[in-house]
Image (cartoon, coloured by chain):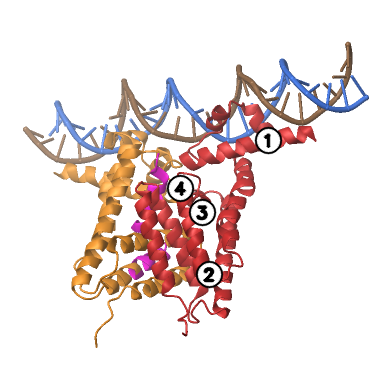
Chain colours: A orange, B red, C blue, D brown
DNA sequence: AATAAAACCGACCAAGTGGTCGGTTGAAAA
DNA sequence: TTTTCAACCGACCACTTGGTCGGTTTTATT
């Protein structure tokens, strides 16, 4: 039991540092030794806990990325009354963490999806699945919003979800090049403008 | 003269094949040998024409990417009367080429911006500059659209440009995972919806 | 204190990597 | 025909990579 704790602690340390460096330098451009140097650990320790570099990354997806995407992008809008306010608030929060140079897992997702696309089918699938859950979650929210009278009937929920996620991932990509405060502000403003055009006109 | 022609031809062949493979497998994950094998050329030929792998990529940017972005995304909307129709048509065209698995240089741009970010400052700058020209071009179009009565006064042109480019790059990222026909359709529909909300109401 | 298993070490390996360099080739210039 | 040189060849180099493995240290159990 106690042993298991140590095992978990070391693995977790490796995963956290691994994700950090993979994210900063890219998966294929980061060597296992890069990570081990940062941790003052040896190859032996690494291959004792993980079967391979790929296996290591899969464990990072399952233990860190999945959970963070859930807690930052999925749960905050789940079951909310007003879909548009919920999405706005969620995006505002996400952009704020992104601005402060913390790991923003929505973007982590798109970043790795790009890097692994066509290069590692298994990992691509894991990442794609997370994205799909996110998308389904938004669609569900919008559909409920229709019956509740927030969202106009003619709205294509799938299309809106696609567009929102696309623009979010896109603006996060631009933000890495700097000027993130301005980009973040512009993005949130335009999202509001866009969402407004989808509202069900309130009958006074 | 004839010699110069041969030189150019070989370099061009290398650049075209290089871009194709860099795009497919990623820059850092592609070796110079990978490209040379495809071309049935030798290391000697490569380093006779280019100083380094990085130098080679810079030449690809200048000779292929810049020009394509101009001809596909910048010139088609330059000086057009109705900004929204121009943007819609331009995006439609770009998405169509993207769907047919041709190289879509708007996405090529974002793809490489992601890969080189924080890893090669010089190349990042070249790519960022292209993106900036694209952005300025859209802003100019929108501003002119205001004076011409197409675009509502309250619209933040910079914000709209950011949002359009973001969403474009984002949806292109999602498209690499498949289902591109649907995504493309959804994206274009939502762009129309969004742009509509920016129109200057016509006085009948 | 003795034991056994878990955790970790680090030298080593084969397979690549970007880049070098002395040499060959073939076509245009003399 | 001879000369010249741009264009190209491919063996080679130093270095890095993911991964292996025999051995050592830590730790909990008896």
Secondary structure under tag 3 reads: helix
Q: Mark 1 lies on which chain?
A: B
Task: Respond whether the residues carrying marks 2 and 1 are from the same subunit.
Answer: yes
> Disc 2 or disc 4, which is closer to the eye?
2
Q: Residue at x 35, y 70 (%)?
A: A92
Q: Mark 2 points at which residue?
A: B83
Q: Name the residue under label 1.
A: B9
Q: Is residue B118 visible?
A: no
Q: How many labels does the image show?
A: 4
Look at the image and say whether residue A95 sits in the magenta stretch: yes
- Quarter holding the N terminus of chain B is top right
Give the Cα distance between marks 2 and 3.
19 Å
Secondary structure under tag 4 reads: helix
Secondary structure under tag 1 reads: helix
User: For the stretch drawn in magenta, what is the main secondary structure?
Assistant: helix
Q: Which residue is drawn at 55% across and 67% down?
A: B138
Spot occupied by residue A159 in the image (x, y as percentages of width and height): 32, 61
Q: Which mark is residue A25?
A: 4
Label 1 or label 3, whichever comes before in sequence order: 1
Viewer-nearest residue: C16 or A125 = A125
Viewer-nearest residue: B100 or A178 = B100
Q: Name the residue under label 3.
A: B106
């Amino acid at each position: 039991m106690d042993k298991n704790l140590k095992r978990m602690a070391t693995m977790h340390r490796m995963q956290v540092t691994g994700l950090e460096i993979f994210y900063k330098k890219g998966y294929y451009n980061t060597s296992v030794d890069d990570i081990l140097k940062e941790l003052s650990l040896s190859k032996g320790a690494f291959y004792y806990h993980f079967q391979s570099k790929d296996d290591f990354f899969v464990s990072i997806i399952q233990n860190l990325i999945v959970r963070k995407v859930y807690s930052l992008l999925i749960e905050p809008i789940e079951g909310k009354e007003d879909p548009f306010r919920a999405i706005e608030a969620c995006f505002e929060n996400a952009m704020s963490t992104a601005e402060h140079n913390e790991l923003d897992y929505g973007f982590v997702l798109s970043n790795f999806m790009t890097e692994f696309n066509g290069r590692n089918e298994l990992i691509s699938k894991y990442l794609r699945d997370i994205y799909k859950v996110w998308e389904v979650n938004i669609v569900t929210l919008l559909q409920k919003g229709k019956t509740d009278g927030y969202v106009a009937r003619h709205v294509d929920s799938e299309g809106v979800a696609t567009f929102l996620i696309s623009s979010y991932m896109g603006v996060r990509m631009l933000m890495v090049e700097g000027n993130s405060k301005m980009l973040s502000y512009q993005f949130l403003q335009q999202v509001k403008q866009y969402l407004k055009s989808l509202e069900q006109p309130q009958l006074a």
